[in-house]
Image (cartoon, grey):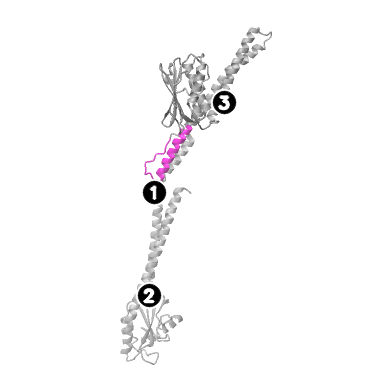
Amino acid sequence: MSIRLRFTLLYNIILAVTLAIFGFSIYAVQMETTYNALQKDLKHSSDRMEGLVARAFANSGQDPFSPPNPPPTPEGNSGSQVFRELPEREVLRVLDPAGALLLSPLGRTAESLPLSAQGLKTVQAGNDWWQTSDFQGQAMLIYNRPIFKNGTFTYILQVARPLTERNRSLEFLGTTFLVASLLTILVAFGIGWIFSGMMLQPIQRLTQTAQAIGEERDFTRRVAYTGPQDEVGQLATTFNSMLARLQEAYQKLAHSLEMQRNFVADVSHELRTPLTTLRGNLGLLQREPPIPADERADITSDMVYESDRLIRLVNELLVLARADAGRNLSKESVAILPILEETCRQAHQLNPVRRISLEAADIAFIGDRDALKQVILIALDNALKHSSGEIMVSAAPRGGQAEIRVQDSGEGIPPDRLERVFDRFYRGEESATIPGFGLGLPIAKALVEGMGGRIQIESEPGKGSLLTIQIPLAATNSYTSEPPVF
């Protein structure tokens, strides 16, 4: 069962229950009101008939209020004057205290109004009695009233009125309300079906969009919603936000898969060259007759060089894998200045001719000491390889971050290559004279991001490059420094 049908049925069930309660209430009120009106009319008639009946007996020359009991009736008259005064549709009977008929339009031969044994006892006890009974094929409301004269119970006055019109009115009311309620429910069902469809149309679009995305894998699609920001509007907005996040995640996943494929291809290429060289040299060493001793020594040296190159490549790949996984990176407060002094001194030993200046505040960061040292060594190694002038290293607090800058004065990096410097195995300068595998900056990026920081590079051709590292700053720092020169 669809939610649209459930909403419509629920709305109509509530409407039907409301109409039923309202209808039963109206019917009960109408039934009680008409019944009370009939009782009031019968009491009024009874009061008037009491005097008329007394005069009828008096005109006949008989006193119905004096013994013997039961009193005599006006013979030959039958109280015709009394019944002419009787309101239309009402029936009058006069009974003696024992319940026998005394006065009627047809005298004592007429049929008396019904009076139950319990009712007779109640009236004889001096109380009024209401009774609903069938009389001559009609439902009648009968009012039985005791009449006293000088404290003596003289006779019983019965006044009755048919309930036919009242019952027909109530039946018509009930039928009319039932038919009207059914028509109202049918109309309400149609209107509710239309309105629920309009209200649920954004949800249908959500469903269609989700199906289309599942079939086409197009996360750029969005749900078009222009209505109010109610529950449905919030659902559409949330769904679009979810699609945006899915699109971003899908793009990242696709990019990661593409990088993984490129990484495997690049690793295969980098490994194939030294392995091919090793395999060829082994073949030369196995030749018969053996090659000369001086050639064998050169081949052995080549094999040692290629083996060392393989070891360096595997070590860098291992460091990169650990950095990607975020493993073994501690989160502790570490002073930056000693790390910079140590790395600058080590870099100066690699190329004693080059000048490396350091200007750093005595600050601390939150992260891993060895990871930061490796990042700084990678930055200085790149600066030494790709520039020929002075290298300037600085560190200072900036906006809650510890900012480390490595500035060289080399040839710089063209804009079309700058955006790829952090790609794995990418080498901006394709000269075979510069050693390396293109993994330094990717390793530095993974390590910095693993510590919750950020790394970026800016470069202008002909003026050099600036590598900026930002990592979380420790709470307690003292900002004093003495710029050493290496």
Image: magenta residue range: 221-250
Residue placed most toward the observer, 318 or 167: 318
Q: Which residue is mark 2?
A: 162
Can residue 242 be found in the magenta stretch? yes
x 46%, y 32%: residue: 474
Left or right for 360, reference 150: right
Residue 427 in percent (x, y) is at 49, 19
Amino acid on which disc 3 is placed: Leu
Our reading of the magenta stretch's main secondary structure is helix
x 45%, y 80%: residue: 118
Sequence-earlier tag: 1 or 2: 2
Q: Which residue is mark 1?
A: 195
Neighbor class of circle 2 (other Cα within 10 Å; few <14, some 14-19, many 20+) is many
Q: Which residue is mark 3?
A: 318
Distance between the alpha carbons at the discs numbered 1 and 3: 63 Å
Residue 249 in percent (x, y) is at 48, 33
Q: What secondary structure is marked by label 3?
A: helix
Q: In this rendering, does residue 175 appear at all? A: yes
x 40%, y 51%: residue: 192
